[in-house]
Image (tube, grey):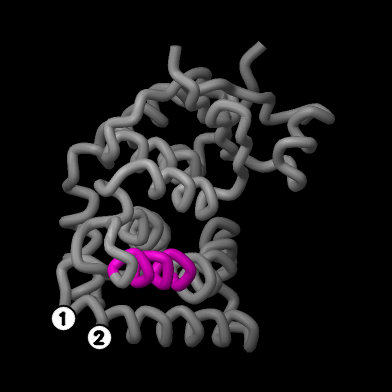
Amino acid sequence: MTQITLFTYDWVPELPRGYVRDLRVRWALKEAGLDYRVATVAFKNRSAEHFARQPFGQIPWLEDGELSVFESGAILLHLGEKSTALTPSVASERSKVIEWVFAALNSVEAASLPWSIYQFCGDSNDTPARKQLDAFLRARLTHMEQVLTQRQWLAADFSIADILMADVLRLVARFDALAEFKACNAYLQRTCARPAFEAALQEQLAQYGEPSADQPKA
């Protein structure tokens, strides 16, 4: 019986399917070939136990034996300790991976997430706040373009940093804002061409595929 359990929602609305952050964990588990099972919690009417495991009532969280870890970045760092397919064993190379894990979350996603909220809401008003968000994201993507022009992966080899960065860039690409950034787009294409990504994506979509109406399962 496997010790690793990934907790996610039992249902989500149509819009975020394929982008829910448990995808990052599924992807890492499949890259490492680690056995795991998926358990679900209610999307609505979240329980006290849920908040005890994830203080914000979000997902995913992971149980590994007696250890419980929440936040996708923290979970990937934990899984990285289990497999050199996710994080190298050489200290200097591992340090680079950790740097880029935090860069993906704190520098790039910090720009892409607020920008994407406007996109999801369909708010196209040319307000000062919107212009600031557009400029913020463009600046971050410009820096990433310079980095990715010179390398295949963020560290020496594919790692958890690439899982996080690619998933962040997927959200930008969803709204057609990555096309002019050729190196970023090429990076995203080769990262998402990995079999483990496709397997993780299909697994998530299969879980959330029913019901099609915007109501939770009974």
Residue 10 image-quadrant placement = top right
Q: Say what secondary structure mark 1 lies in.
A: loop
Instruction: Give whichever of 16, 3 is nearer the camera.
Output: 3
Q: How many marks?
A: 2
Instruction: Give whichever of 170, 180 is nearer the camera.
Output: 170
> Is 77 left, or right, of 54 in this rendering?
left
The structure residue drawn at horizontal position 46% and vertical position 79%, both measured from the top left corner, is 137
Instruction: Give residue 79's position: percent from left, percent from top.
Output: 42, 43
Residue, disc 1: 150
Q: Give the alpha-carbon distance from disc 1 to disc 2, as whole Å.
A: 7 Å
Comparing marks 1 and 2, which lies closer to the viewer? 1
63 relative to 125, above or below: above
Write down the region rendered in magenta.
Answer: 93-103
The structure residue drawn at horizontal position 40% and vertical position 57%, both measured from the top left corner, is 164
* Disc 1 + disc 2, Cβ < 8 Å: yes
The structure residue drawn at horizontal position 30% and vertical position 34%, both measured from the top left corner, is 30
Instruction: Give residue 60's position: percent from left, percent from top.
Output: 57, 39
> The disc labelled 2 sits on which kind of residue?
Gln
Residue 139 image-quadrant placement = bottom left
Residue 91 image-quadrant placement = bottom left
Q: Is residue 57 magenta?
A: no
> The disc labelled 1 sits on which kind of residue?
Gln
Q: Say what secondary structure mark 2 lies in.
A: helix
Instruction: Give residue 49's position: percent from left, percent from top.
Output: 79, 28
92 relative to 207, above or below: below
Prevalent SS, magenta region: helix
Residue, disc 2: 146
Instruction: Give whichever of 173, 127 is nearer the camera.
Output: 173
